[in-house]
Each structure stands twice: as C-alpha cells, then as structure tokens.
Image (tube, rainbow, N blue to C red):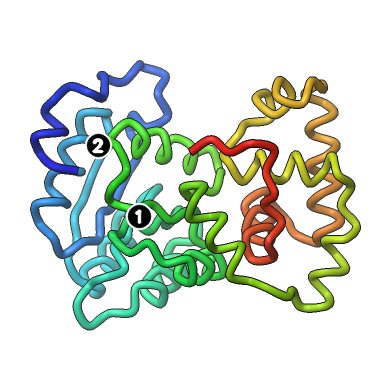
Amino acid sequence: MSPEAARSGAVGDPEPSDPLVGCRVLIVDDHQLFAETIRWLMERHGMVVGLASEPGEALHRCRQDRPDLVLLDLGLPGADGIALGRAILEESPETKVIVVTALRDPRMVKEALRAGFHGYLTKDLSLSRFVDSLRAALADQVVIPQPLARAASAREGRREAPEALLAEQLTPREREVLALLAQGATGQAIARRLSITHNTVRSHVQSILNKLQVGSRLEAVAFAIRNGLLEAPGSTD
C-alpha cells in the first residue's frame, strides 16, 4: 500500500456512523513508510492511531492506551510475532489483534487463530478491502483473505478424533452458515444468501456454537479453519 495509492482518493471519507470513527488503533511495524501510510489512511477515517516499532514499546502502549485494534507485523527483528500478540492479549483482553504482513503462510494463519487473533491480512490488499476488513473485525468477525483461509484449511489433513466427532454433528445447512461466517458475512447477509430469516440464522449460529463447544463466532470460524470445514458455497475474494 503505497503513499501514492493512499493519495489517489480510492477510499472515501467516513460517514458519521462509521464504526471506525474514534476507534483506537496501534500499528506495530518496524517499516516506517508502511506504518506512516496506514496511519494517514486510518486517521482520514477518524481513527486514533499510535505507532510502535518494537515489542517493549508495543506492550507499553497497550497497557497505557488499551487500543481497540492492534495491527501486528510478524516480521519484527528479533521478535516472535505470535508470542507478542499473545502477550498483548494478556495485557489487554478486549483488544482485537490482526496480523498485517507480507507473509502468505497458511501455517502462520493457523498459529494466529490458535493464539486468539481476529485476523490475518496481507500487505498486498487494496486500501478499500483493508478498511472493510477493519470494520468487519470491529464487528467481531474473523478477517482472512479467502484464498489464504482455504490454503490454511488444506494443510490440516487428517483431523484429530475429538474435533472430527464435533464437526460431524453439523448439518449441511450449518456448514453453509459456518462457511459464510468465515467469509465475514453478517447475519442479515447470510439470511439473504440462503433465503432464510434472520432468526433462523441466529438459531443455526447458536447450534453451531453448541455442537463445536465454542463460545463465539470467532472461535467457531477458527475451529473451521483449523479443521478444513470451509467448503464454502461460493467464495467472496
């Protein structure tokens, strides 16, 4: 995401009701040009943005500012990005951690989800897709580009027996709902896509959570990606 692309006006000014307005964000990245460009973009959308370039500084800012979102580069010199993200969540459990990296690594996607992160974005995303992903994360959705999510699922191979038994309880309709959740679809969007009511979607989601023995949509999507359940009814790359 270059400064030239950011200046092109491809991303419009925010609406007053935009959930990004007033959102507190910490960018953890040692590449100053990238970090400054993204900060410019997010401030244009009304977000309050801080920068950190190393782990100690990032943890200090999280303790002090309690950001809503942390955008974390996995490639910090001398640091384990996944471990740093876990430490951030321990310091600030309400913060949503999203990997923003140049690494298209399905193994790291799975590690990020296991650590409780809300997403894994690559630095080749368009600015509009990037901003939409932040909105989705604030709505408690998991944000991962579909090709990368499918690649992460394909790596799993044979599932462990207990998780396989849980997954086998899902009906075909529940698998459809779960796949759409993994694409970032809202309850209303799922209802339209499957020609069912919003109340029926809620019932399916609750059944999915019960059968998979998880407590949130985020955990259900993480389970699906870990265990290769994303035979989606059409992807939305």
Above or below, 75 against 42 in this view is below
Amino acid beneath label 1: Val
Horizontally, residue 37 falls left or right of residue 211, namely left
- Residue under label 1, please give it: 70
- Residue under label 2, please give it: 42
Q: What residue occupies the far bottom of the structure in this picture? A: 78
Q: Nearer the viewer, residue 198 or 181?
A: 181
Dot 1 falls on a residue whose secondary structure is strand
Horizontally, residue 136 falls left or right of residue 196, namely left
Q: Quadrant of residue 215?
A: bottom right
Above or below, 161 against 183 in this view is below
Residue drawn where x is 48% and y is 55% of the image: 148
Horizontal and vertical percent position of residue 39 = 18, 43
Horizontal and vertical percent position of residue 197 = 81, 21
Residue 211 numbered mark, or none: none
Q: Quadrant of residue 125?
A: top left
User: In the rendered structure, which disc, 1 or 2, sits on the residue that comes first in sequence?
Assistant: 2
Residue drawn where x is 61% and y is 34% of the image: 185
Q: Quadrant of residue 232?
A: top right
Horizontal and vertical percent position of residue 86 = 45, 72
Residue drawn where x is 26% and y is 19% of the image: 12
Amino acid beneath label 2: Met
Q: Nearer the viewer, residue 145 or 140?
A: 145
Question: How many numbered marks are there?
Answer: 2
Crowd rating for badge 2 (residues with CA inside 10 Å; few <14, some 14–19, many 20+): many
